[in-house]
Image (spheres, grey):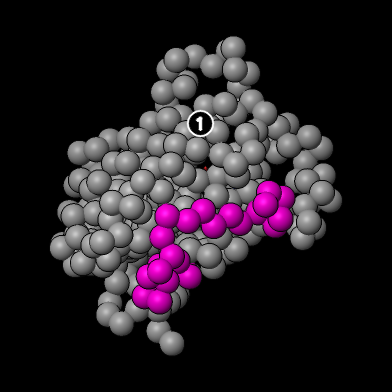
Amino acid sequence: MAAWSQPRTVIVTGGASGIGLAIARRLAAEGAAIAVLDRDEVTATAAADSITAAGGQAIGLAADVTDRPAIDDAVAQVRDQLGPPTILVTSAGLDGFDRFLTITPAGWERILAVNLTGTFHCCQAAVPDMIEQRWGRIVTISSSSAQTGNPLMTHYSAAKAGVVGFTKALALELGPQGITVNTVPPGFVDTPMLRRSEARGFLGTGVGQHEATTPVRRVGQPEDIAAACAFLVRDDASYITGQVIAMNGGRTT
Ligand code: NAP
């Protein structure tokens, strides 16, 4: 059964790398037109080109999710080039490791700006098209850090916990208009972000150490998250909203 009864346009923020890229590729394979939005034009375009080369439809757009005018402009470009975006996945994210007492106010603000306020900007820019179409799907990418906390990540954990609360509240507000809003908090997924943490020594002896204590005994793959996301944005997921769908190999239940 097709995912949608009519053509759909998707915006994936952070779509040039890791989890966002896997989601963009998966939804393109399901037949949606994809706008890959990322802060670097070269990587956003390369991601879109890889989708096109695989037979999908995609454009790449450069915008920083903390820059509201740039986000508004990107959404307008998507509407013009691909049609009204009625699916939004917010995967753009920035991690950070610092002791609580040495986090600077500017460092705190930056982590909140990208992860939480960036999610707000993208949702507020995209929702009017969904309201007009009386159909929409939003999936925010939060983090298992919001569920458990994480050492040296008070700022990141707070920002991602904010995304969870934001998602639940937005689901209540938009439900009557045919728009669902859910969050996927990933945990321990093999992406450039995770490997950067490993290289900087924040994963103990490395990914292997954590695989040994993960119930499914492996690191997650971006495609695992993409599979959950593809399910949540289908037509027939219309009764699922305001939910936290954790994807972490059983590390957090
Ligand atoms: P990733 O490979 O680093 O991908 C994140 C993408 O977002 C990158 O292309 C990055 O660009 C982009 N980005 C960062 N700041 C941006 C901004 N201000 N505006 C627009 N784009 C921006 O990381 P990932 O692991 O796939 O992470 C995807 C999401 O999952 C993030 O929200 C992350 O917090 C969350 N997450 C990941 C894990 C995990 O285990 N991997 C666990 C929990 C949560 P640059 O590369 O140029 O910075």
* Local secondary structure at mark 1: helix
Q: Report the residue at 32% width, 41% height from top.
A: 120
Q: Position of residue 148 (x, y in %)?
A: 64, 38
Q: Can residue 43 be seen at all in this image of the molecule? A: no
Asked which quadrant contains residue 113, the reply is top left
Residue 52, above or below 110: below
The secondary structure that most of the magenta stretch takes on is loop
Q: Report the residue at 43% width, 65% height from top.
A: 240
Between residue 80 and residue 187, name the one nearer to us.
187
User: What amino acid type should be assigned to the residue bearing mark 1?
Assistant: Ala
Residue topped by disc 1: 158
Q: Report the residue at 42% width, 30% height from top.
A: 112
Q: Report the residue at 70% width, 32% height from top.
A: 202
Q: Position of residue 247 (x, y in %)?
A: 61, 56
Q: Position of residue 35 (x, y in %)?
A: 32, 60
**Other-residue count near label 1 (Cα within 10 Å), few / some / many at <14 / 14–19 / ≥20:** some
Residue 244: within the magenta? yes
Residue 81 shown left or right of residue 224 in the figure: left
In the picture, which quadrant includes the N terminus? bottom left
How many numbered circles does the render carry? 1
Residue 120: within the magenta? no
Asked which quadrant contains residue 145, the reply is top right
Give the residue furthest to the bottom.
Answer: 1
Residue 232 shown left or right of residue 186 in the figure: left
Which range of residues does the magenta coloring cover?
230-253
Q: Can residue 236 be seen at all in this image of the molecule? A: yes
Residue 164, above or below 149: below
Between residue 63 and residue 174, name the one nearer to us.
174
Classify mark 1 as within 8 Å of ligand 1 or not, answering yes or no: no
